[in-house]
Image (cartoon, grey):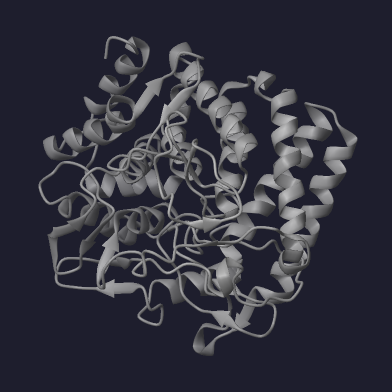
Amino acid sequence: MADYPVLEREINGISGKIKNPKVRQMFLNCFYSTLKTTTEIMEDGTTYIFTGDIPAMWLRDSSAQGTGYLPFASKDEKIKELIRGLIRRQFKYIKIDPYANAFNREPNGHGHKGDVTGFDSPWVWERKYEVDSLCYPLWLCSKYFTHTGDASVFDEDFAEVARIIMDLFEVEQNHFERSEYFHHRPHVPEQPTLIDEGKGRPVAYTGMTWSGYRPSDDACEYNYLIPSNMFAVVVLRELEKIFGQIYTDETLRRAAATLSAQIQGGIDRFGVVEYGAYGKIYAYETDGLGNYNLMDDANVPSLLSLPCIGYLSPNDPIYKNTRRFVLSRDNPYYFEGRCAKGVGSPHTPDRHIWHIGIIMQLLTSTDLFEIKECFETLINTDADCGVMHESFHADDPKVFTREWFAWANTLFTVALLELYEGKAEHFKEAARMCDLFED
């Protein structure tokens, strides 16, 4: 790629060591998917990254797509600027409407304008409030600093956006008492939205923060979404360190520390349940009133993905119990078929497995045979397209949703790079078992 010669040299070096021609081409297709097909550098220097077959930029998807290039940001100044530009654009969007999850390239009024909600902007594509959508840009900033050592991203703009997000999380700890947010989609009944004219089901105070929608963009059944609250704890703890050590602001540091402790207390008290032979596991959702949703959804953050988002160790005993549940038929969205097995989502048709779910299973495993099985499933279920999809049928991978889905493509390259770098011994051994790379 003429615009990124340093990156191209790095990637050619890696791809040249991949033995299997199909895997090599899939790696190249997936790695360059976001950069070649969904990225535009705007006149103001910000970076617009849309999700693929939908012409809008999700805060969540764009962050995940950007993380695929972070390992190369310290070597390629253009990649570094691309990610900084993405962060600046995300902050611009959050200041327009922190409740929105997806935005337009320009103020063109595109998107779901038939939705009934309390605010609209021509910049907003969709206004489904999701806790994870606000976590992802902060997470991206932290990851950017880790990879580059560039602390200039922690500026006044960052502090303003962090304050907006923390204030909103605090408001949504008492959704019915303090929040003005509502959202429903009455004209599209096949897409369920929040009940009670967009306010959602009753909840009690737990210390956790309320979410209208899941990372799948589906409406929550019970609005304390446990994986997203765990993600909030991760980014709030990062904010506490940033405002204590890098961009010194004692008020914001204390606010992050207080909020993370309150949310964590809610998770500890309301997020863990006893479930049969599994023992203590994490619930997916609760309302603080005694109701729980025991399931997992492939979209990240998920219960399966908790080690990947940095919330806990894969050896955490409750996580290990939860993982056994998630990867079993007791999870209503775990499917087994003639061609594959893995986690799906109520967002897609029955018996459809998500490539993202298989990737999360691979990245959170320490079992060599499981890692090998997951990787082989990924390369054998591409429907001969050479890329990942949103989901595919457990009995027939050629029946799939979303031919162009850059988030899944990025995560495939993240998984392959983990195997290539072999920083963890079990990934190094799994790569050898798969016979992936030349010595």
Quadrant in the picture for the N terminus: top left
Q: Is residue 438 visible?
A: no
Toward the right, the furthest residue is 250
Count of marks, rendered view: 0
Quadrant hosting residue 210: bottom right
Residue 123 place in picture, x, y as percent: 50, 35
Instruction: Determine the residue positioned at 57% across, 22% down.
Output: 148
* Residue drawn at the location 33% of the way across and 26% of the way down: 35
In-front residue for pair 128/141: 128
Residue drawn 87% across and 44% down? 254
Question: Residue 384: x percent and y percent?
Answer: 10, 47
From the viewer's perspective, is residue 372 above or below residue 103? below
Residue drawn at point x = 56 percent, y = 56 percent: 117
- Is 370 in front, or is 410? 410
The quadrant of the rendering that contains the C terminus is top left
User: Does 126 sit above or below residue 81?
Assistant: below
| Left-right relation of 265 to 383 | right
* Percent coordinates x, y for residue 39 in the rendering: 36, 26
Q: Is residue 432 left or right of residue 95?
A: left
User: Looking at this rendering, what residue extends furthest in the bottom direction?
Assistant: 276
On the rendered structure, is 398 left or right of 159?
left
Query: For residue 437, what is the image quadrant?
Result: top left
Left or right of 356 on screen, residue 396: left
Is residue 274 depicted above or below 89 in this figure?
A: below
Give coordinates of residue 4: x percent, y percent. 35, 13
Is residue 431 shown to the viewer in this render? yes
